[in-house]
Image: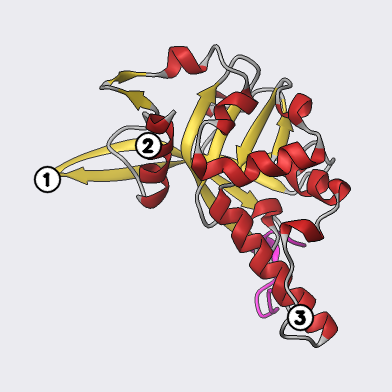
């Protein structure tokens, strides 16, 4: 639906909103309709997530996405950033500035591997989170993810209010706080936020990550 597309675009463009209430239709909540949809059908309704749906289709992961899972979805922008990072890595490896890494460069197994970095078993909603760091393991068996709540302050026309937003953190090597003083942190953690949260579908839970979250949380580092 065009309403979902427009709202996701708005939420991804802004750092926050007055309430953590997303997906409205003609001034009324659209959540009841979405609760009757599969996760795949929800993702398919938005052009902000169209490339993610393309990847799901290419990897044959529709049934997995529609399972009892929580999907921290990247956006099309995040997929494009992933391709740019992979292109840099490929050009450095081959010493060829003209070569490009595209979606066609990805095998079905590679797509599955990176998408599964965004998938966690069961429902992870705000009730499952705290303000302290808590480790979660994705369906790839990678446990290097901290997901927690963070208070977010909003000032609208001089009136200040607070809400809780979800912070998502991927650990590379040691957590940042565990790197000894005086030691160079060559693999700093990656931090991002959920911009559209707790979208409950008929089959699972979706959180849409900020646009700065690369698909697969891939970051090329020339170390």
Identify the residue at image location x=57%, y=50%: 76
36 left or right, relative to 164: right
Q: Is residue 101 above or below residue 202?
A: below
Magenta stretch holds residue 151: no
Identify the residue at image location x=64%, y=43%: 52
Q: Quadrant of the C terminus?
A: bottom right
Q: Nearer the viewer, mark 1 or mark 3?
A: 3
Residue beneath disc 3? 91
Label 1 environment density (alpha carbons within 10 Å; few <14, some 14–19, many ≥20): few
Q: Nearer the viewer, mark 2 or mark 1?
A: 2
Magenta stretch holds residue 185: yes
Foreground: 166 or 3? 3
Q: Secondary structure at mark 2?
A: helix
Identify the residue at image location x=88%, y=47%: 109
The answer to which image quadrant residue 78 occupies is bottom right
Q: Secondary structure at mark 1?
A: loop
149 left or right, relative to 103: left
Residue beneath disc 1? 158
Numbered label attached to residue 7: 2
Identify the residue at image location x=60%, y=14%: 202
Q: Main secondary structure of the magenta part?
A: loop
Marks 1 and 3, how far apart at CA: 50 Å
1 left or right, relative to 119: left
Marks 1 & 3, CB-CB < 8 Å contact: no
Q: Secondary structure at mark 3?
A: helix
Q: Looking at the image, is mark 3 or mark 2 earlier in the sequence? A: 2
Marks 3 & 2, CB-CB < 8 Å contact: no
- Residue 103 spot, x, y in % from top left: 73, 57
Q: Quadrant of the N terminus?
A: top left
The answer, for residue 52, to whether it is visible in the render is yes
- Which span of residues is magenta-colored? 172-186
């Amino acid at each position: 639906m065009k309403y979902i597309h427009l709202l996701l675009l708005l939420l991804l463009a802004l750092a926050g909103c007055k309430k953590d209430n997303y997906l409205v239709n003609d001034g009324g909540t659209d959540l009841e309709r979405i609760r009757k949809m599969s996760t795949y059908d929800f993702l398919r309704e938005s052009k902000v997530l169209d490339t993610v749906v393309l990847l799901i289709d290419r990897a044959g992961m529709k049934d997995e996405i529609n399972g009892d899972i929580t999907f921290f979805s990247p956006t099309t922008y995040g997929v494009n950033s992933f391709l740019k990072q992979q292109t840099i890595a490929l050009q450095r490896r081959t010493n060829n500035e003209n070569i490009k890494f595209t979606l066609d460069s990805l095998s079905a197994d590679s797509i599955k591997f990176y998408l599964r970095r965004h998938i966690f078993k069961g429902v992870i909603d705000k009730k499952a989170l705290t303000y302290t760091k808590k480790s979660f393991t994705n369906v790839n068996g990678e446990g290097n993810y901290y997901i927690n709540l963070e208070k977010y302050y909003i000032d609208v026309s001089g009136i200040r209010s607070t809400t809780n937003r979800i912070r998502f953190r991927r650990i590379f090597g040691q957590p940042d706080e565990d790197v000894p003083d005086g030691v160079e942190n060559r693999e700093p953690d990656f931090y991002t936020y959920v911009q559209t949260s707790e979208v409950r579908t008929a089959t699972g839970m979706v959180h849409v990550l900020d646009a700065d979250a690369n698909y697969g949380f891939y970051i090329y580092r020339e170390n």
